[in-house]
Amino acid sequence: MVEFLAADARFSPISGSGTVRGLLHAPEAAPSAGLVVTHGRSGNLQNPIPRRIATAAADAGLAALRMNFRYTDEKGVASRDLSREEDDLRGALRFMANRFPEIPIFLAGQSMGARVCARASADPLATGLIALGYPLHPKFRPEVRDPPEWPMVVKPILFVQGDHDPFCDLARLREDLPRLSVPHDLVVIREAGHSFEPKGPKRDTFLEVWDAVRRWMEERIPAP
C-alpha cells in the first residue's frame, strides 16, 4: 500500500466531549477486518511502529486507523490512570465499526498504548488485543508487580516483546501470563529493545514484528 491512501479522520471519544484525530488506511477492496493502532506515551501517530503497522495492515486487506491520543495534540500529558486515553480509543472503535460494519476489529498498542488497549478490552466491539512492547513494570524494575490494567484483559491478546526490553523482563512476563483468564500468545523478537530497535547487527526488526501480528490476526479473522 502507498502512503497517500491514508485519509484524515476525526471523531469523538466515547464520552462525546472533544475530538480525536487519526489517519485511516483503507484497502481498495472491502476489508476483511479492522485495526486501531495506538502510540506510546511520548509518541504520536507518526511514529514508525504505528505508521508501518497501519500501512502493512492496509496492504494485507485490513482497514487500519492510527490515532493520536488527545493529549498529544493538546501538548499535554497522558491521564494518570489512562482513563481519558481509554475514552479516546473506544471512540476510535466506534468510528471503525460505523465505517466498516460487521467485520472484526482488533486493537494494537505500542508501549503505553498497549496498556490503554488492555483497559478497553471489555468493549464489545473489540475482537482481540495486540501488545507491542508491553510495559509490564517500570524501567529495569521487574520487582514492581501487579500492573493495574492486567485484570482488565478480557479478550485474546498477543504480546510481541523485544528480549532486551527494560520495561518487560521476559522471565517475569512468562511468570505472569498464566494469571490471564483469556487466550494469550507471546512472540519474542530476538536482539531487540523496547521499540524493537536492534541490539545486535543492524536489521529491520519490523518485518519480524509484522509477521507475528499478521499471522495472529489471520487466525482470528473468519473466512469469507
Image (cartoon, rainbow, N blue to C red):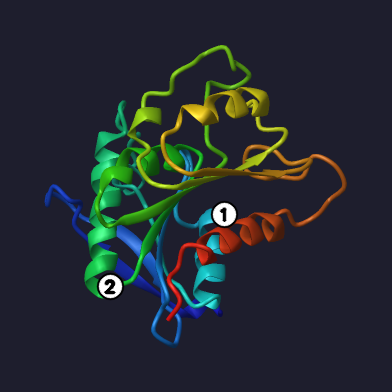
Mark 2 neighbour class, 10 Å CA radius: few under 14, some 14 to 19, many 20 or more: few
Cα–Cα span, label 1 and label 2:
27 Å
Q: What element carries label 1?
A: helix
> What residue lies at 23% left-to-right and 55% top-to-bottom?
91
Of residue 60 and residue 43, the one placed in the foreground of this image is 60
> What residue lies at 32% left-to-right and 54% top-to-bottom?
126
Coordinates of residue 212 in the picture (x, y in percent): 63, 56
Is 92 situated above or below 136?
A: below
Residue 186 location, quadrant:
top right
Q: What element carries label 2?
A: loop
Q: Residue at label 1?
A: 49
> What residue lies at 37% left-to-right and 37% top-to-bottom?
153
> Of the residues shown, which amino acid type is indicated by label 2?
Glu
Residue 187 visible in the shown view: yes
Q: Residue at label 2?
A: 102
Count all numbered tags in the image, as a single digit. 2
- What is the quadrant of the N terminus in the image? bottom right
Residue 167 visible in the shown view: no
Judge from the rendering whether residue 149 lies leftward or rightward of residue 144; answer left or right.
Answer: left
Is 153 situated above or below 127?
A: above
> Of the residues shown, which amino acid type is indicated by label 1?
Ile
